[in-house]
Image: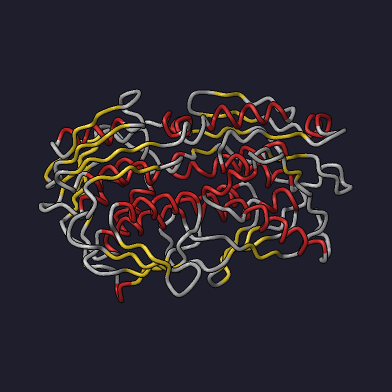
Amino acid sequence: MNDPLPILPFTSGGLLEAMVPGSKSQSNRALLLAALCPRPVRLENLLDSEDTRLLRKALADLGVEVRAGDAPDAWIIAPRGPLLPADRAELAVGNAGTAARFLPALLALRPGGSYRLDGSPAMRRRPMAGLLEALAATGAITVHPRGEPGHFPFDLATHGWEGGRVEVDASASSQILSGLLLAATGTAEGATIQLRGTTVSAPFIEMTLAMIRAFGGRAEKIGEGCFRVEPGLEGPPADAYRIEPDATAASYFFALPVATGGPCAVGSWPAASLQGDLRFLEVLAESGLPVAEEGDRIRTGPRPPGGLPPTDRDFNAFSDTFLTWAALSPLLGAPFRITGIGHTRHQETDRVAAVAAELRRLGQAPGEERDALALQPDRAALRSVARDEPVTIRTYEDHRMAMSFAVLGCHDLHGDGRPWLAIADPGCCAKTFPGFFGELERLRTAASARPAPSS
């Protein structure tokens, strides 16, 4: 744990250029796919964070060669034979959902394996049953729970997943389906995977399919909730794959003009991004914040003088970004609803409950529903509760809680530059964006030397 970090408001503006690391979602998919390729693969712009380090270490513990490349963000992943060399290992997934849902399916490929897996206390509360039950039904694994069935910790006896038809309940997380799709490239027969019901965050499934194809595999959706993955990967062109900037990390800076007034840009986007979280830009644009593509960068802001009247929005497909919009709700101009977020109650924390609790701490009166939040902006109440000293926001060991409310704290609430909001345990951001608060301070320092925007 770290002491609460006061957030210094931005008191001036001007166009800012934010720098964000590589995509966490793409990084961990790329690590797994590279481990299944027949030749070494160079991964460029790989995110260096707690989540990716956990998966890199797990792959190394399983006998995959994982070594740093000739650039700070480059890594070489090289297989050591057609199967995972280590048939015994103890693997820690921490609070990394992708590692937690990707590794069991990968391990299932190895006949005669015996693996012990565990996660953080928060991860032990996150659902794993859909994935484990699907793999067990194929005969590829036998699960020995060491706690609550369907959750970490557990031991796996692996018998080798040959492929074939699989039915899976991925309603709790799209990562469950993605884990099966990725590992299916390593089966002898390929796999047809049928969803029971639906899944959430569907753009992440499209990302998984596209990345399999980018690594020389064949994967497609062949019917409603049905997917086909053929066996084998050839590797990406020139045996190198470059990871995009992280769209979820960028969303904090795309939203920064709501708090500060001045425009902000994030660069180095490919012509066609794989990341569904860029749809957060639609929310900003629909609420009246200017959004512009300028070459390979995206600029948002400045905030219009009349403020932003938000609209009701379903965030199911890009739910990691709902926290940012909810955290900024005290600064917005009208009541609105965020829907499609019930599944986020089973992520790093119960995100719906956590956001609602911290907004109440800020004098707001959110309406909490199972799958939604009804938000009632009240700037006067915000000023009142933060009048004498900074309000400390609890983060629940959740990086997105910390980063979302930090953006709110960038607003110069009292008009005199006084910090009025502090973030508890800011170190939790190491999960996906270790340098977040340093980047926020770099931007604030840069803004201080520029003319203030009109607002």
365 is higher (above) or lower (below) than 444: above
Compared across the picture, whether 261 is left or right of 275 comes to right
Tell me, what colour scheme is on the image?
secondary structure
Viewer-closest of 136 and 268 = 136
Tell me the residue at 37%/37% (across/down). Answer: 173
Location of the N terminus by quadrant is top right
Q: Give how far across and how far down residue 407 sits, in percent.
A: 68, 47
97 is higher (above) or lower (below) than 206: above
Q: Give how far across and how far down residue 11 sits, in percent.
A: 83, 54
Q: How many marks?
A: 0
> In which image quadrant can residue 401 be found?
top right
Compared across the picture, whether 390 is left or right of 80 comes to right
Tell me the residue at 78%/53% (across/down). Answer: 10
82 is higher (above) or lower (below) than 191: below
Q: Give how far across and how far down residue 270 sits, in percent.
A: 46, 68
Viewer-closest of 321 and 148 = 148
Q: Give how far across and how far down residue 342 sits, in percent.
A: 46, 30
Tell me the residue at 43%/34% (across/down). Answer: 123
Compared across the picture, whether 258 is left or right of 219 comes to right
> In which image quadrant can residue 406 be found?
top right
Viewer-closest of 391 and 225 = 391
